[in-house]
Image (cartoon, grey):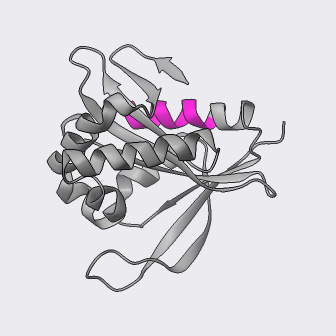
Amino acid sequence: MFIEFDDYYIDTIHEKYAWRICDFCTINAERLQRYFPKTLEQNLTPDLSKYFVERQIKAFEAREEFLFVLKEKENHELIGLVYLKELDWQKMQGELAYAIGYQVERKGYTTTAIKAISQWATQELHLKTLQVIAHKSNTGSIRVAEKCGYLWTCQLKAAHTPPGENPLDMELYELHHEG
């Protein structure tokens, strides 16, 4: 999948992105540490990123997990990551998780990307339910989910444990597609 917008584009994971993912993760380490600790630890060096990308490509091809990159058009800098993960093909359900670089937050890139990937997931993969799970303090993520039509469903008790912290209750937002 490749979707082009005015200032940036969304692309599927590709081996050529390993170095850029490493850069993105190290530059945004503080942002990723709490909610994307596994992605961060797997991309701290170029070699780790290479293995990470190889695994993600295999997962994409096997339809186990889909990773997309957001890249600026002008300099092709990687500015964000979007996962479609926790796929349940019996329930036709998946979860979206997204991270945007500090340098481009609040520009609407994430909202536009989530709308596009949500549409792709329902039309191409025929998923019926998409989920976003966010902590109540992550107002940016919640705002994106709501702008994309996701509705708050419930609170998930002790659903995520950041490194060195106690388990956190998380908010579940869902988008249902009947098509």
- The quadrant of the rendering that contains the C terminus is top right
**Residue 22 rendering spot, x and y as whole percentages:** 23, 44
Magenta stretch, overall SS: helix
| Residue 168 visible from this viewpoint | yes
**Residue 158 rendering spot, x and y as whole percentages:** 48, 82
Quadrant assignment, res 173: bottom right
108 in relation to 143, above or below: above
- The quadrant of the rendering that contains the N terminus is top right
The magenta region covers 105-118
Is 24 positioned to the left or the right of 60 in the image?
A: left
| Residue 66 visible from this viewpoint | no
**Residue 177 rendering spot, x and y as whole percentages:** 76, 42
Is 23 positioned to the left or the right of 62 in the image?
A: left
Q: Report the residue at 77% width, 38% height from top.
A: 126
The answer to which of 69 and 99 lies nearer the viewer is 69
- 148 is within the stretch colored magenta: no
Is 124 positioned to the left or the right of 78 in the image?
A: right
Q: Report the residue at 26% width, 21% height from top.
A: 76
Q: Report the residue at 62% width, 50% height from top.
A: 64
Quadrant assignment, res 91: bottom right
The answer to which of 153 and 94 lies nearer the viewer is 94
Q: Report the residue at 37% width, 56% height from top.
A: 139
- 110 is within the stretch colored magenta: yes
**Residue 152 rendering spot, x and y as whole percentages:** 60, 60
Which residue reaches farthest right?
A: 179
